[in-house]
Amino acid sequence: MPNPHIEIIDSQILSDQWYVLKKITFRQEDRHGHWHTVSREAYDRGNGAVILLYHKAKKTVVLTRQFRMPTYLNGNDSGMLIEACAGLLDHDEPEDCIRKETEEETGFVVREVRKIFEAYMSPGSVTEVLHFFVAEYDDAMKKTQGGGLARDHELIEVLEIPFDQSLGMIASGEIRDAKTILLLQYAALNNLFENDK
């Protein structure tokens, strides 16, 4: 149901070079019944999916490391970021997307994935909803080296890290990616590495 306190007046495309950046002008009613005209910019890159691969017996997780230009521009000296495997839906269902991304980026072929929640990651400026998944992996699921798609200029390093170490890497600042931190904390809070009773 549309918000009765919001009325969109104008939508203007500022850029569509990579994804779509729009300037939205709207009227907003405040709590006193007064209407005000406001403009905001919104970046539409589509929705995405992210997954934490975890190995119960080895107590490890699979993460990736790659260059991220926005972090480089904002003080990340190397521009390299450690992340959980993720990708944009591109018209796929979230489950299909994350299976495909997992194989492309990590080389692991997983069939059983479990959705745990979805979240807006930067709601002040980006429209994206991210679907969060977890899946168990084992060494037999490793079919390729992974590393991403050459045609997309992806240079992705695959990392297998002890789970306890990955939690420490949040505290040390080695892991600074929000979606990855959320998944690792979910794993800790929900005892993913405990044996089923």
Image (tube, helix red, strand yellow):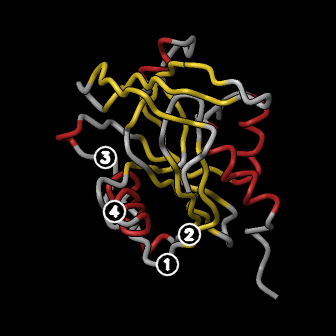
Query: Which residue in the protein does label 2 denote?
Result: 135
Q: Are marks 1 and 4 in contact (CB under 8 Å)?
A: no
Work out which quarter of the rendered image holds the N terminus and state it: bottom right
Residue sitting at 31 percent across and 46 percent down?
148
Q: Amino acid at mark 2?
A: Ala
Question: How many residues crowd around disc 4 within 10 Å: few (fewer than 14), some, or many (20 or more)?
Answer: some
Q: Amino acid at mark 1?
A: Glu
Q: Earlier in the sequence, mark 4 or mark 3?
A: 4
Q: Residue furthest front?
A: 33
Query: Marks 3 and 2, Cα distance to the nearest angstrom?
Result: 19 Å
Query: Marks 1 and 2, Cα distance to the nearest angstrom?
Result: 6 Å
Label 3 SS: loop
Query: Marks 4 and 3, Cα distance to the nearest angstrom?
Result: 11 Å
Q: Earlier in the sequence, mark 3 or mark 2?
A: 2
Foreground residue among 126 and 107: 126
Question: How many residues crowd around disc 3 within 10 Å: few (fewer than 14), some, or many (20 or more)?
Answer: many
Residue 163 pos. (x, y %): 71, 54
Residue sitting at 30 percent across and 37 percent down?
154
Residue 148: numbered disc: 3
Q: Are marks 3 and 2 in contact (CB under 8 Å)?
A: no
Query: Which residue in the protein does label 1 denote?
Result: 112
